[in-house]
Image (cartoon, rainbow, N blue to C red):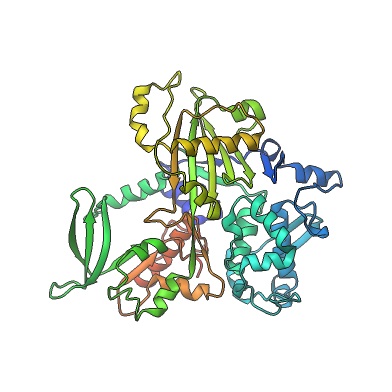
Amino acid sequence: MRYMTSQKIITTLIKNVFASELTSVDFPTGNNKNHFGYFRKQRFRLNAWRDAQKNGQKLETRYYLNEDDKGFSANQLFNKVVYSVLKHDSRFMEQYGSRISHPSEYEYIFHLTRKDWDHVKPKIVYNFKGAYNGEKVNDIGFWNLIKDQVSEEGYTFLANAGGYYSNTINWNSAEAFPYMVEDFSDDKMKYKTIEGGYDKIAYALADTYLRKHGAAIWGGNRLLTFHESKDTGYRYELVFFNEDEKREYSILANRIILGMPKRSLKLLNQYNFFFYRNTRKVFQRNIDSVITEPSFKILMGFEEPWWEKDFGTKAGRSITDLPMRQCYYFGTNPDDSHSLFLGSYNDMRSAIFWSVLDHEPLYEPKETRLVSSANLKGLKPIQAPKRMVDEVMNQIREVHGRQDIPQPYVTWPKDWTRDPYGGGYHAWRAGYDVPEVMKYMRKPYPDEDIFICGDAYSNQQGWVEGAFCVTENMLQEHFGLKWPEWLDKSYYLGW
């Protein structure tokens, strides 16, 4: 996982608050000259678009793009689409026209802050002849809009070559605009991560909390439901299932914070007083304001970093339209050559390709010169299925054009689609009043002290920062907490 330094809560926590415990390091993205693109059985290096552009040429792909879209990389074409829509909105141009520019044929620059985007997103109007002329972009699906701008073939190119199907599903176009041009289509974007693993931020926060008087974390407990408490002196009674003891038990509380995504909320009893499906129509509609996006990964360990020796690749990713979608070249142990490789990072419709392969027999871990069979014994139960590994390795070899890439010595799959997550990330549906729903979801009912937080109903979906901003707004609005002393007071938390 990674973060951007413009995300001030996570950045400040790592660099200042937990400076003695956490170390920020660059998240390496490598060089596209060493990364592969493999689409419709055409293989090239991912810098091929820019190399052709430097020579006054247009890279010929196997996509039948509109004449004025030929030669664009996926990132460049995403930027072109957003720029074109903004440029044709006169109100936007009056207020923010000076903050976008088109200095060269393939270059589009956006200098809007998150606060700027939040100001304009609900107001952007689509001004092109056709089915959507005069509609607010907030009410248009992103697939609809892309197809209208660059044709269905152009949409297919963007969906495939962009790496993530989730970016081009039919979600809220207004929310998609800053997400694409700021987070995913900026080739100059630099990312950071935490030395030793991104999960160290969660442990640092938990350890700090546990040092407070009366603090406790009870793991292994699953919330089933909650209801109004009678004659106890408390407002609510929560019912949990303890995984170790295999039994239910209850606790009492006056306030409830549900730090949950959409699917986890749906797994709770939908007929209690809070969710009641037959009468809580507004709440149920707002729960469904986001799309849950399936995601699947398979991590692999190799004895040697074959990608570095054979292709000069040390970091970054290759992209394909095969079901594996993306692979990431991770680090090599500095003390030996054992290396990590993300064999597949896929989402949406490609995730189901892998779920069908998810059954025994499991892959058999292999001894290496440094790892004995005894050391691997404990890893056997968490291996990916054998035919899943065989399938992903077939695709990896096809993408790289080399059939002698070795098998991994160990694997680890992760299907984020499974309960209680439901997906790897979320996206706003078209047609919803996003700022209104965000505020609503933090405290759905004025007369109940029940709150919801997390990144699912944020305007930075898929980022830890989204969860932090929603939670900070919730704490200040409803719990009377003051602005954190360690956080820049000018930082924008969002709606």
* Residue 400 visible: yes
> Residue furthest toward the left?
231
> x, y percentage for residue 16?
45, 48
> x, y percentage for residue 273?
28, 76
Name the quadrant containing residue 135.
bottom right
The residue at the point 43 percent across, 20 percent down is: 370
The residue at the point 65 percent across, 27 percent down is: 310
Nearest to the observer: residue 367 or residue 212: 367
Nearest to the observer: residue 151 or residue 229: 151
In this rendering, is residue 391 above or below 243? above
In this rendering, is residue 63 above or below 178? above
The residue at the point 69 percent across, 80 percent down is: 134
Name the quadrant containing residue 371.
top left
> x, y percentage for residue 387?
48, 37
> Residue furthest toward the top?
369
> x, y percentage for residue 298?
48, 41
Q: Is residue 396 left or right of residue 132?
A: left
Q: Is residue 422 left or right of residue 233?
A: right
The residue at the point 83 percent across, 48 percent down is: 58
> Residue furthest toward the right?
56
Q: Is residue 459 left or right of residue 444?
A: right
